[in-house]
Amino acid sequence: MSDIKAKAELEVMQQGALPDGRRWTLDGEGYQCQLDSNTFFALLNVNNGSNAQIQIPHDEAESSKLNGWLEWLFDIHGDVAIVELVSLNGDKIKEIFKSDFYQQTEIWYRGNNGGTFPLRWVENDQGVKHPFRAEPVKGEVYRRHFHTLGMDLSLRHLDPDKDLELFTSWMNVGRVAKFWEEEGDLEKQKKFIREVIQDPHKYPLIASFDDVPFAYFEVYWALEDRIAPYYECHSFDRGAHMLVGNSRFLGRRYALAWLKGVSHFMFLDDSRTQTLVGEPRADNGPLLKYMNGTFGWKKVKEFDFPHKRAALISCDRADFFEGAGKV
């Protein structure tokens, strides 16, 4: 569902609720939104450009209870980039920038880094000097509700026992095998998973919509990866190999959500990461169609790996967060 369509449907509905049950209504003045059981606030000027206003009692201005409403607002109304908090008499209290809001790790991020892991240089077995990387957290590391879908996207560390059969079935789907070329039985996939988990520059993740697994994302540090010699690589650049194994979640509206969510996670996982990269096969038309020009992603060039013709795609941190609500 597009942001425009979602917004139009909201305005027809005239009322609705956040996932936590707090309600909103829409009238001629704007939205009336429930902050808690005793407090409501007005959300004004939503459809008048990039600035909206929240009119709220001064002592509630710093409340984390606003986070759910800000996420809803920025998700549904993609043109809004700045929210002004104003008092009941109209005095400005503060401004909230969308680009700042989406860089808060405490709302969505469940990992152990967030840019706080100390910088220490080491050398790997291939002679590449790189920052020492934090060991990935086992379990869920990211969760975000996408209001345009009405679903949660979550990312968790791949469990080599729990996920083996599912992972094997995905690797043997024809459209996946065409690009990954890793089809095979349980023993082959067990070996594949073991090697990924033991590689300190890789972070294997299972993605779910409303806790239904649908995809595998192999997040990696680019400096230690095969892609590094093919572009001007920096110490905290990040990338991901990806596959959607559950055909129920194919299609543009799901792709837009997982692309935004996985990109968001990689930037939150280390504040020093300024660039995301990828190297899908150059003939992977469906993936390149979704990614080129979306959320700051762009196709840079094509180049030749020893095993494939690849497309270099990249996403700049500033571009991603400035356009966090837009396609």
Image: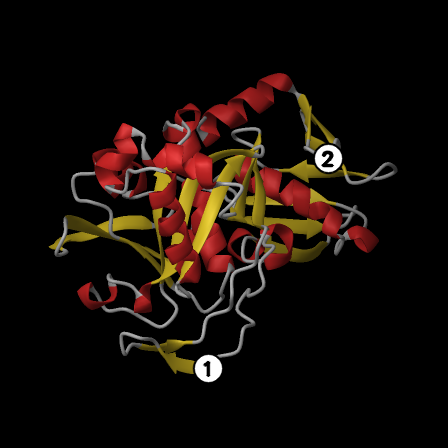
Mark 1: secondary structure: loop
In the displayed structure, 80 sits above or below 247; it is below
Rendering quarter of residue 249: top left
**Which amino acid type is marked by label 2?**
Asp
Please give the label number shown on residue 20.
Answer: 2
Q: CA distance from mark 1 to mark 2?
A: 42 Å
Single out the residue that lies furthest toward the right: 38
**What is the crowding at mark 1: few (fewer than 14 residues within 10 Å), some, or many (at least 20)?**
few
In the displayed structure, 104 sits above or below 2; it is below
| Percent of width and height locating residue 306 | 12, 56
In the displayed structure, 196 sits above or below 174; it is below
**Between 203 and 269, the one nearer to me in the picture:** 203
User: From the viewer's perspective, is the residue at label 1 or at label 2 nearer?
Assistant: 1
Mark 2: secondary structure: loop
Q: Tell me if residue 94 can be seen.
A: yes
Please give the label number shown on residue 251.
Answer: none
Q: Quadrant of the C terminus?
A: top left
Q: What residue sits right under mark 1 in the picture?
A: 120
**Between 299 and 152, the one nearer to me in the picture:** 152
Single out the residue that lies furthest toward the front: 187
In the displayed structure, 291 sits above or below 250; it is below
Residue at x-position 48% and y-position 79%: 119
Q: Is residue 60 left or right of residue 284?
A: right
| Percent of width and height locating residue 292 | 27, 43
Residue at x-position 27% and y-position 79%: 127
Q: Is residue 197 left or right of residue 67?
A: left
| Percent of width and height locating residue 272 | 45, 69
Marked residue nearer the N-terminal end (1 or 2):
2
Q: Quadrant of the N terminus?
A: top left
Residue at x-position 59% and y-position 22%: 11
Give the colouring mode of the picture: secondary structure
Residue at x-position 26% and y-position 33%: 286
